[in-house]
Amino acid sequence: MQDIVYKLVPHLQEKEMKRQIEFYKKRGLPPPNYTGNDENSNERSKTPVAMNGEEQDFHRSDEQINVCLECVTGSMRNLKRRFLRLSCQATIMQLKKFIALKIYNNMTRFKDVDILCNEEILGKDHTLKFVSVTRWRSKDTPLLLHYRQRVAEL
């Protein structure tokens, strides 16, 4: 139906496209289905944009920390990739959920995992920056963390 209108009204399609492009430029959004050759289109495609138009950062601009995760007991299997690069704002709870997902294929079993640094169990709300500064101090990177199955309390 729209094709018929464009054929009947001269230059309507071009004017409509220009208005649409201006609308999205004013709001800093990439136009949908626009295949223009402007230089900004490549830059926009590299930066993910949320549905509400805000750029998604995913903590990429945060300070990063290298972490090595090793299993200390034979009851759990080792991770395929034990080295991770994470935001310093990541918490031990997030690491527990990651390990539970990789080991048990079930994120809800994060309570079955303990994470240790220097043989000390870390609290769920500790950030990696906090652990790095207080437990690891000035040791070489990566931050070495051990994980094990939670020891049942009697």
Image (tube, grey):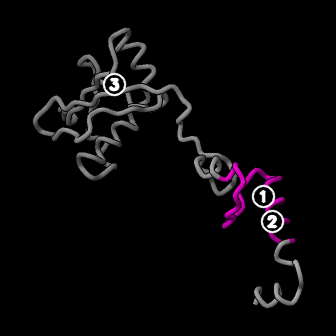
Q: Is residue 37 magenta?
A: yes
Q: Nearer the viewer, residue 44 or 63?
A: 44
> For this view, does 152 lie left or right of residue 45?
left
Determine the residue located farthest toward the top in the rendered image: 138
Tag shown at residue 3: none
Q: Identify the residue position indicated by label 2 in the image.
A: 20
Residue sitting at x 53%, y 35%: 60
At label 3, the amino acid type is Leu
Does the residue at mark 1 contact the one at mark 2 (Cβ under 8 Å)? yes
Residue sitting at x 85%, y 65%: 19
- Percent position (x, y) of residue 2? 77, 86
Q: Identify the residue position indicated by label 1 in the image.
A: 24
Q: Is residue 148 magenta?
A: no
Residue sitting at x 47%, y 31%: 87
- Percent position (x, y) of residue 145? 28, 25
At label 1, the amino acid type is Tyr
Q: For the magenta stretch, what is the residue range?
A: 15-41
In what quadrant of the picture does the C terminus appear? top left
At label 3, counting other C-alpha atoms closer than 10 Å, the crowd grade (few under 14, some 14-19, many 20 or more) is: some
Asked if one can make out residue 153 in the rendered structure from this viewpoint, the answer is: no
Q: Nearer the viewer, residue 39 or 95?
A: 39
Q: Calculate the distance from the C-alpha at mark 1 to the C-alpha at mark 2.
A: 6 Å
